[in-house]
Image (spheres, rainbow, N blue to C red):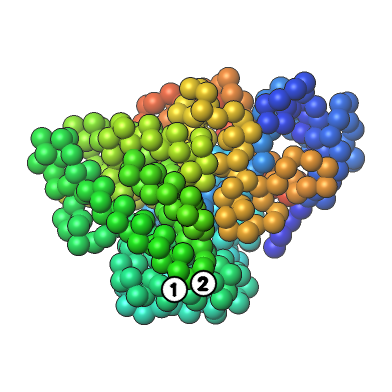
Amino acid sequence: MQVSGSVLIADVRPYGEGDPVDVLVIDGEISEIGTDLTAPDGADRVEGGGAILLPGFVDLHTHLREPGREDTETIRTGSAAAALGGFTAVFAMANTDPVADNSTVTDNVWRTGRDIGLVDVYPIGAVTVGLEGKQLAEMGMMNAGVAGVRMFSDDGKCVADPLLMRRALEYAKSLDVLIAQHAEEPRLTVGAIAHEGPTASRLGLTGWPRAAEESIVIRDALLARDAGTRVHICHASTEGTVELLRWARDQGIAISAEVTPHHLLLDDSRLNTYDAVNKVNPPLREHRDNLALRQALADGVIDCVATDHAPHAAQEKACEFAQARPGMLGLQTALPIVVETMVTPGLLDWRGVARVMSERPAQIVGLTDQGRPIAVGEPGNLTLVDPDTSWVVQGDRLASLSSNTPYESMTMPATVTATVLRGVVTARDGEVTR
């Protein structure tokens, strides 16, 4: 059930600009912005203390593991992590068990997320049946279901067959939905577990070349051009991908892309310990890739940040590096890492943070009630950030059922102090409220 509420958020600076003001949300909508505002009886109140107010964050790439792997994450625990991280909407990937390749699964994920009510949970439908890359899934039925699925991806696997991908893009155009591609040419990554470079060579790890990603990026850009439709690139990770995206934009191709926080911050030097918490797909690249991705995000060549939040059980990480499952937690640490890599060095201001974490992801998938300006008449989906309070990551204290964070014991700049979904406070001072 969609719930709306009323709250007075006092003493905050929208986008970190100007003198503090109060923001009053009535019945889920911003009704007034000013000073010394009075909340109606029964309204909640959040004391901002001069903190920064941003539109609620939108994550296009989350793994909630339900159905099938509720030992590692559930829609409830993932929603809690999202709310604590400042998110008001997340898109849940299709690689569940059973796969979200039909409306029965996608509608159930939608209903469960609505019942929990901490964030808006949008299921992503599979492009192919069973993620097997052989037969297109019934995207039309998933789109027509109660979930109204608007984004499709086989993430974790690439839609490698170019003819099948072409048909998927043509089908997506007729439905006005988005195909999101996990760009990985599988014939180039057989047995690959780490970025192909000096570190992998020295450590004896099979390399995952940049070309495996880049060859699919350019192929799908051309397919999207010919189909006259859009394509979205998941977790861009290489310097070359940045240049290909720039070229495609210059050609007028409708292509968008996301970058993960870990590809902005971390590089493959972390593999020296063979700690599988650092294993991810695509792999951590080299520092030059980090720098190129940061600049591309600042320039708008890469549109947005997406977490690729990927919980795993302890035994799936505490094993030989080659056998470990790829992926890491990301929802509660996303904003601080964007601050560390983008705000602190001056690549983005707080309006830029709103652009890459809220506005652009909402626009990419056509959400009309998320990523909106902080203005009277707009939805009350908001995130409050204290830029001056740091915190230390402890995996076993995060909201996720899993604890596979690569940031264990790291000090994070900036703290999300409250999250508001349609006027209802869903997280406050490090605790979920529902």
Q: Residue at x 73, y 56 (%)?
A: 3
Q: Amino acid at mark 2?
A: Ala
Residue 379, x across and y down, in percent: 75, 49
Q: Callout 1: 10 Å neighbours few (<14), some, many (20+)?
A: many
Relative to the observer, which residue lies in front, 215 or 183?
Answer: 215
Q: Secondary structure under badge 1?
A: helix
- The answer to whether residue 154 is left or right of residue 197 is right
Residue 401 appears in the rendering: no
Q: Nearer the viewer, residue 399 or 94?
A: 94
Alpha carbons under labels 1 and 2: distance apart = 6 Å
Is residue 9 something that shows in the picture? yes
Amino acid type at mark 1: Ala
Q: Nearer the viewer, residue 229 or 328?
A: 229
**Residue position for label 2:** 172
Residue 350 in percent (x, y) is at 61, 30
**Badge 2 local density, few (<14 within 10 Å), some, or many (20+)?**
many
Residue plotted at (76% across, 53% down): 4
Q: Is residue 377 above or below residue 98?
A: above
How many numbered marks, from 0 up? 2
Horizontal and vertical percent position of residue 312:
34, 50
Q: Residue at x 44, y 53 (%)?
A: 248
Viewed as shown, does residue 274 lie left or right of 135?
left
Instruction: Point out which mark residue 84 bears.
Output: none
Q: Residue furthest front?
A: 251
Which residue lies under the disc numbered 1? 168
Q: Say if mark 1 contacts mark 2, CB within 8 Å.
A: yes
